[in-house]
Image (tube, rainbow, N blue to C red):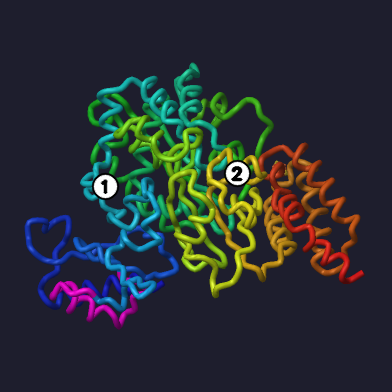
């Protein structure tokens, strides 16, 4: 978006004035430092420049604005109001007061857009690695598992399985070799939460994984990141090297007697590799295909050894829980789904971007208060939640709290946290066709119901979109959806029909219009 040019230009201008300091090396000198940070989340308004300590946030900054920012704000302490967020004749100077941020609770994203993700010192200055120190010196592995279980942290990858229970199951396994795996494969169209966490706060993920390693008596970890995320891979690589250099990874961490190291494994971008057994097969160098379970990953995962498998956001929650305690965590959001959730909000909404809200926040708050409502004053029609495995929600669900159980009740799921907002002009049959096309392409082909069934469903949907479908086709779609979801081998197939089922449920009239009009 041009942010790097702006970074360089601002630095150059400050340097010309003789005021440039290196924030890490010249901390005793007076001057102005410039740093790159991870994503602030307000993607619609980028490139963003934040001024500290005033907390000003400048939006849509262009290269020609840099001189004014330096001369007015950095030298003369004056705000450049035209670059600030304004609404209803009000200028919002501080980032935290902007409506987009005000309703958010940023826990896993707290360092994103704040610290330099490539700086070990900045992470430590924000309290980083204190949680690791606490578990290594004050807690037994079982206590760590219990603490995560008590917090009721549920897996943020989609399933919502309690992370502490998974950790306890791995701890119980009698094996000298155990693994901790982080799923950073995030393949849903419209989702970029894990990417932003890895890019903006890589040490948070590393610390969470190392704590999981200690809690389960594992000796090494793997972060599986899709190769299409080169910046995430690079920042994780730098963070792992720095953590090793400072004794937070490797042999005898902080002289505690505990050894643990982490490797990065790049995925080639297959959606199915987000499924646990396909992901571990891919790390092993095999073709990424799911296998029949049991045995479960906690018993026989990576190289047939007990394995903790959680996603990026789950691990990123762990250090704060250890430091602040499980009671504190349970106090955020509803009891059955405590904590926060990061969502990537995209589509026909004014403020697209990355947000983090307490679980239980309603869809209306997310789409209208934080997302700023529908673009061009159009009417809200639906939101696809949970990516291709999720479902569509409509106006009647706007007051629905976003948490694992409430969504399940209406046939949707949080999934990894993608929210694609659609306005009144969106054709819901085309939406169903789009997601079915995606899933069909990504089906690994191992089992018949998914391999053949999704193909047949896609053919029918194409027929309907092209005005050649019949009413009987709608029944056939429902029958196929039912068969595939009850017989497919893995989650991809089981949930492949969800977008079709939910659009048929809530927008059947639209399907009928396509069918009847052309007959
Ligand atoms: Fe592969 Fe689909 Fe079967 Fe999963 S359900 S194993 S993706 S063919």
Q: Residue furthest bottom?
A: 64
Q: Relative to residue 174, is residue 456 depicted above or below?
A: below
Q: Looking at the image, can residue 395 be seen? A: yes
Residue depicted at 31% across the width and 45% down the height? 241
Give the quarter the ligand 1 occupies: top right
Q: Position of residue 309 (x, y in %)?
A: 50, 35
Asked if the residue under mark 2 is in contact with the one under mark 1, i.e. CB atoms within 8 Å, the reply is no
Q: Which residues are magenta?
A: 58-79
| The one of 190 and 180 positioned closer to us in this rendering | 190
Q: Position of residue 391 (x, y in %)?
A: 66, 51
Residue depicted at 67% across the width and 44% down the height? 411
Quadrant of the frame with the N terminus: bottom left
Disc 1/disc 2 C-alpha distance (Å): 35 Å
Residue depicted at 86% across the width and 65% down the height? 515
Q: Which residue is mark 2?
A: 407
- The numbered mark, 1 or 2, whose residue comes first in the sequence reads 1
Q: Classify mark 2: residues with Cα within 10 Å, few (<14), some (14-19) or many (20+).
A: some
Residue depicted at 72% across the width and 37% down the height? 489
Mark 1 vs mark 2: in front: 2
Q: Which residue is mark 1?
A: 123
Q: Quadrant of residue 464?
A: bottom right
Q: Relative to residue 340, is residue 139 depicted above or below?
A: above
Q: Relative to residue 302, is residue 445 depicted above or below?
A: below
Q: Position of residue 70 (x, y in %)?
A: 20, 76
């Amino acid at each position: 978006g041009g942010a790097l040019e702006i970074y360089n230009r601002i630095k150059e201008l400050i340097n010309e004035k003789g005021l440039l300091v290196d924030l890490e090396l010249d901390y005793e000198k007076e001057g102005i430092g410039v740093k790159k940070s991870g994503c602030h989340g307000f993607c619609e308004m980028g490139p963003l420049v934040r001024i500290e300590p005033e907390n000003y946030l400048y939006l849509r900054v262009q290269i020609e604005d840099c001189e004014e920012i330096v001369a007015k704000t950095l030298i003369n302490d004056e705000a450049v109001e035209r670059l600030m967020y304004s609404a209803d004749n009000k200028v919002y100077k501080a980032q935290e007061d902007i409506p987009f941020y005000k309703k958010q609770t940023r826990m896993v994203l707290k360092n994103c857009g704040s610290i330099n993700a490539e700086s070990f010192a900045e992470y430590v200055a924000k309290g980083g690695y204190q949680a690791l120190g606490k578990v290594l010196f004050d807690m037994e592995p079982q206590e760590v598992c219990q603490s995560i279980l008590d917090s009721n942290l549920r897996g943020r990858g989609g399933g919502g399985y309690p992370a502490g229970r998974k950790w306890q199951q791995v701890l119980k396994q009698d094996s000298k070799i155990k693994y901790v795996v982080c799923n950073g494969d995030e393949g849903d169209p419209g989702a970029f939460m894990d990417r932003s966490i890895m890019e903006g706060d890589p040490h948070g993920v590393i610390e969470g994984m190392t704590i999981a390693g200690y809690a389960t008596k594992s000796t090494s970890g793997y972060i599986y990141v899709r190769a299409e995320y080169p910046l995430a891979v690079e920042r994780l690589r730098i963070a792992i090297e720095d953590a090793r250099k400072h004794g937070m990874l490797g042999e005898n961490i902080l002289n505690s007697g505990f050894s643990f190291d982490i490797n990065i494994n790049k995925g080639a971008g297959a959606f199915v590799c987000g499924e646990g057994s396909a992901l571990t097969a891919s790390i092993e160098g095999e073709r990424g295909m799911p296998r029949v379970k049991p045995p479960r990953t906690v018993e026989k995962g990576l190289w047939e050894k007990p394995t903790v498998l959680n996603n990026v956001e789950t691990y990123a929650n762990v250090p704060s829980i250890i430091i602040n305690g499980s009671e504190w965590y349970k106090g955020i959001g509803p009891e059955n789904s405590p904590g926060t959730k990061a969502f990537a909000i995209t589509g026909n909404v004014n403020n697209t971007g990355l947000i983090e809200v307490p679980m239980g926040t309603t869809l209306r708050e997310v789409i209208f208060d934080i997302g700023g409502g529908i673009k061009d004053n159009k009417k809200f029609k639906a939101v696809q939640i949970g990516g291709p495995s999720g479902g569509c929600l409509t106006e009647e669900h706007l007051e629905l709290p976003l948490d694992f159980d409430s969504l399940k009740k209406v046939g949707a799921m949080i999934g990894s946290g993608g929210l694609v907002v659609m306005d009144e002009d969106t054709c819901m049959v085309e939406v169903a066709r789009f997601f079915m096309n995606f899933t069909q392409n990504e089906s690994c082909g191992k089992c018949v119901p998914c391999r053949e069934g999704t193909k047949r469903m896609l053919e029918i949907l194409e027929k309907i979109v092209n005005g050649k479908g019949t009413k009987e086709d709608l029944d056939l779609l429902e029958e196929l959806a039912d068969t595939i979801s009850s017989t497919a081998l893995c989650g991809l197939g089981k949930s492949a029909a969800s977008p079709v089922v939910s659009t048929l449920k809530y927008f059947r009239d639209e399907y009928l219009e396509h069918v009847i009009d052309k007959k």
